[in-house]
Image (spheres, helix red, strand yellow):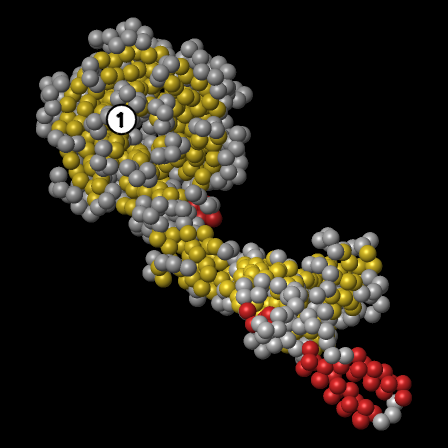
Amino acid sequence: MNHVLSAFCSAFSAVLRIVPQTVFRIRSAAVLAVLVAAAASLAAHAQTGEWAWMGGSSVLTSGDNGQPGVYGTQGQPSAANIPGGRLGAVTWTDKDGNLWLFGGGGFDSADTTGFLNDLWEFDPSTKEWTWVSGSNTIPAINGGQPGIYGQQGTPAATNTPGGRSGALGTTDANGNLWLFGGAGFDAVGTDGNLNDLWEFSPSTREWTWVGGSSILDVNGTVAGVYGTLGSLTAGSFPGSRNNGAAWTGNDGSLWLFGGYGRGVPLQAGPLNDLWRYVPSTNQWAWMGGSSTPFQPGVYGQLGTPAPGNVPGGRDGAGAWVDKDGNLWLFGGDGLPLAGDGDLNDLWKFDPTTNEWAWMSGSNTCQVGNICNWPGVYGTLGLAATANTPGSRGWTVTWTNQDGTLWLFGGTGTDANNVLGSLNDFWKFDPAVSEWTWMGGSSMVGAGHATAGVYGTLGSPAAGNLPGSRIEGVAWTDIDGNFWLFGGDGYDAQGGGGDLNDLWEFLPVAATPTLSPASGTYTTAQRVTISDSTPGAVIYYTTDGSVPTASSTKYIGPITVSSTETIHAIATAANYANSAVASGIYTIQLIAATPAFSPAAGTYTTAQTVTISDATPGALIYYTTDGTTPTTSSTKYTGPITVSSTQTIHAVATAANYVSSAVASGVYTIQLTAAMPAFSPAAGTYTTAQTVTMSDATPGALIYYTIDGTTPTTSSAKYTGPITVSSTQTIHAIAAASSYSNSAVASATYTIQPPPTFAFAGSPTSLTVASGSQGTVTLTVTPQNGFDSTVSFACTGLQPSVSCTFSPATLTPSGTGAVATQLTLSASTATGSLRWSARPLFPAAPLALAVGFLWLGKRRRVWMVLLLAMTFAGAGMLTACGGGSPSQPSAPNVPATSTVTVNATSGSIQQSATVTLTVN
């Protein structure tokens, strides 16, 4: 789109090419209605943020299609202060986050329109404007204040740039504000395109004229001095221009590109020269492009940087710096490969390689060299490779903190290739090189523009949207939020003019997340609400109302024990309130699943199964035939006997509860043969045992082992009693038809004889003389743990023979033998009792004869017996020797007898014999 200079310009005004304030301004009532209706339809467009109208007027009140400024007292902030409506101003954000605004074409405090040189500061925290410097009046319609340059390089409180529009502005690393050129007035009040460079210090509030010309030539311009390409050269300086693009590089250098202006002498038009300025050396370097205007673009291959690539000459392009320090350029009114018009090409410049890359958009014009391309909007909110804004110029741009590039409105073509004033909102992600349509209208409608939807002052809302505009100005504050001011556009009623409305685009806080999610639950739920927005505060309701910041503040889990709906929003500083999150929780309690006791499993005996349920007042219904139980099934009233394999299914029902899940219990009854029984029982015995085995299982066969191994049905079969004569373990099992083999029965028989002792004497024969003695050693050897006291006694002693023991008793210990000494003593009297050697009276034969007579006759028994005893006694008397010396005896004959020695301990008695001969 070509523009003509306003009437105030000189004979060379055609080369200045600034935007008049009457472009697309439609005032008919019918068109206003269309604009307002179109604006209302945009409320349904969802965005990732919300616009808030923060100040200025929503309706133009000036009869000259603008809004005058309210300046207040210079240097004093006030809530009532507001700059007048304008377009083509310059903006900066300082290091403290304050927003700055300078000049533009618009309205002063007296509602006079022209070129402004007022400087304003806006504090986002207090939402107040301060008129800092410059004039609050314009000398005449379409006029402007001349610049006060002072001494070059020297700041002064009285210094101030002249009124201007379309200047280039940027901010250096120290937070100082830089201003270059624009269409306006020089030091002597001459109007034209300027090339003066200014620096403003927010801390001292003083301007410094840094370079460029303070006086325009007779043509109202200043020619550029290009010097050596790529070199910082003393004396090099860009020519005068307006509506170029400017950036601040990561190294603090200031960059500018193109605009409408003058390169070499007497040649003015859309430029494509690229310049770099280093503040520390106050030197410019011509970095690329041509020194003459009207140059077509050299696009190269899409997405590929190359030394020969360069955008065509243009003015009114959008510009950004990404987080990596790359410079981006979009559209404007200029030249592609051929032809001219509004462009939609996107370019990236890498300062480290000094190369341009064409990234998207068209590099050609349509038929007839008309370069107005329609936008490809795609789906609202969804990025796509094919998406691209339509051709446009004089758009508004921001760079987000995440490195994405944003633009709003401008003058150009919509989705239907209809030319008009736009209010569409776009985002470009350099990481994926894709555009996303984020809001606003994709069609300008019958009125070729869209009215603003302002909503409530200071309140972000999804339906709010600035009206269509061109040459508005923008800031990104230190919180990353976007701000928009003025421009030539359309108010709430569709009225067109120079706006002074102030807007903030706030990201919408993330919608809260409810956990667990909405749904139907069978138990009470503890619902937690979270939000991913830093510092978010959550408010909620449970009564169906829409939550606000006055609703209940979320501080912890919410217990939902009955059906309930939770609505929640998130709020956070520098964010619009989130969308409402809703969670509908239907609590449908289910009766507890019945429980079986004992638990399902395999058993070896019949089981008595009980069924219980934890639900208050529950009734239980069950089946044993494999079917699913219902309330028509058997009602559980008491224990169920399961004597064979069986499956029980059960459900529980209760008032205000859904029937429980089906509980199932599979009871496998697998009978096991009884363990064999031993008789006598296992134990310790003193004698060999005859062991019998029996089993209670009908028809059981018993198998056993005695070698310690586990018996099987291949082991010895029990057929009768088993004699256990020594310690032995018997293992046995029982086997029977339809039974599992029994467990192994074991019985250990310990055969342990009673404690006793062995008893012996040595020697076993002994000869002693009368009047002397002899000894025999008697030993007691304990057996089977015998450890009791043993006493001794003798029997079978000859007359006058005695026995003694030393010691008299023995007590064995352990297994070793103990001994005592037996002493046999023969007294001297033993000899007088011996038989005489003289012939005996035949009394003995006589008695014997009488006996035989008795035996033979068997008569007179008592008389004969008495007679025999008489004769025998008489014989003995006559045979006894008296031992009288007067009657010498016959020689002694040795007497031999067997002496029995008894060893006794309790009931145990052992004997030993000694053959004793006494001489």
Residue 91 against residue 654 in the figure, above or below: above
Pick out the residue farthest to the right: 857
Quadrant in the rendering for residue 849: bottom right
Residue 867 against residue 808 in the figure, above or below: below
Residue 303 is situated, as x and y percent measured from the top left of the image, at 48, 20
Question: For numbered disc 1, what is the local secondary structure?
Answer: strand
Classify 10 Å Cα crowding around label 1: few (below 14), some (14-19), many (20 and above). Answer: many
Q: Residue at x 74, y 69 (%)?
A: 679
User: In this orientation, which residue lies closer to the viewer: 220 or 401?
Assistant: 401
Q: Quickly name the residue at label 1.
A: 170
User: Quadrant of the image for the N terminus?
Assistant: top left
Q: Residue at x 56, y 56 (%)?
A: 816
Pick out the residue farthest to the front: 886
Residue 641 shown left or right of residue 86 in the figure:
right
User: In this orientation, which residue lies closer to the viewer: 839 or 50?
Assistant: 839
Pick out the residue farthest to the top: 228
Residue 47 is situated, as x and y percent measured from the top left of the image, at 44, 43
How many discs appear? 1
Q: Is residue 76 visible?
A: yes
Residue 159 against residue 772 in the figure, above or below: above
Residue 60 is situated, as x and y percent measured from the top left of the image, at 30, 44
Q: Is residue 111 visible?
A: no
Residue 382 is situated, as x and y percent measured from the top left of the image, at 51, 38
User: Quadrant of the image for the C terminus?
Assistant: bottom right
User: In this orientation, which residue lies closer to the viewer: 775 or 811?
Assistant: 775
Residue 586 shown left or right of residue 347 in the figure:
right
Q: Amino acid at mark 1?
A: Thr
Q: Residue at x 71, y 84 (%)?
A: 873
Q: Residue at x 13, y 39 (%)?
A: 75
